[in-house]
Image (spheres, rainbow, N blue to C red):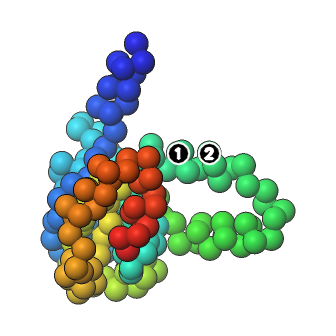
Amino acid sequence: MADEKIKKMIEDELFFFGEYSHSIDSQRRVAIPKNWRAKGSNLRFFLLPGRHKALQLIPFNSFKEIFEKIRKISFADPKASLALAKLGSMAQECECDSQGRIAISPRLMEEADLSDYAIMVGAISTAQIYSPDNWKKIAESDESALDVVQKIMEKPDDLASILKGQI
């Protein structure tokens, strides 16, 4: 029974693989790759500033988990309150239109140095959106993806530490 529950969760989960180059139109819209969108539905995302001048594209269902944790933070905590205000001011909820596009706010466009083109990169459970120049710098780094996979296979319970050491 537990195995079936896990299998169903995995089937319902979105995964993001691959690298795609898309133009950004004059209304700041960019198409989400078709294989990243839920079949037969208008997919909702949260778009947040990410690391390395990227935008982090988080599926709505994944963001719900983050939201549940955020709700437990006291708004009376001055540091937490400020951090949430910064995050909330930059976060953007977006839904794919009938052509699979989302619009990116001017502020997030500026945050990621985006103009006419975007490189969309699958990051397994989320996606990242980079300007072509920013992605080129990151993609040219020395670390091989297979080296990361090897470290994960050697120490699967230490995944967070392994991934932190690769950046």
Return the residue nearer the eye: 34 or 155: 155
The front one of 83 and 101 is 83
Amino acid at pointer 2: Glu
| Residue 106 seen in this snapshot | no
Q: Where is residue 106 shown, x and y percent of the image?
A: 42, 80
Name the residue located 34 percent from the left edge and 38 percent from the top edge: 13
Say which residue appears at 29% left-offset and 31% top-offset: 11
Q: Which mark is residue 151?
A: none
Residue 53's place in the image compared with 73, above or below, is below
Sort mark 1 into few (<14), some (14-19) or many (20+) by Cα contacts within 10 Å: few
The kind of residue on which mark 1 rests is Lys
Give the secondary structure at mark 1. Answer: helix
Name the image quarter holding residue 151.
bottom left
Q: Position of residue 128 (x, y in %)?
A: 32, 66
Distance between the alpha carbons at the discs numbered 1 and 2: 6 Å
Judge from the rendering whether residue 84 lies leftward or rightward of residue 62; answer left or right. Answer: right
Q: Residue at 84% of width from left, 62% of height from top?
A: 76
- Quadrant in which the C terminus appears: bottom left
Q: Which mark is residue 68?
A: 2
Tell me which residue sits at (44%, 47%) in the image: 157
- Tell me if mark 2 has few (under 14), some (14-19) or many (20+) residues whose alpha carbon lies within 10 angstroms of its own: few
Q: Is residue 4 above or below residue 143?
A: above
**Which residue, as the protein is rendered here, is positioned at the far top?**
1
Q: Where residue 95 sits: x, y (%)?
A: 37, 53
Pick the quarter of the image with the N terminus.
Answer: top left
Q: Dots 1 and 2: beta carbons under 8 Å?
A: yes
Label 2 SS: helix
Q: Is residue 38 above or below residue 52?
A: above
Q: Residue furthest front?
A: 154
User: In this view of the protein, which residue sits in the foreground, 25 or 76?
Assistant: 76
**Circle 1 is placed at which residue position?**
64
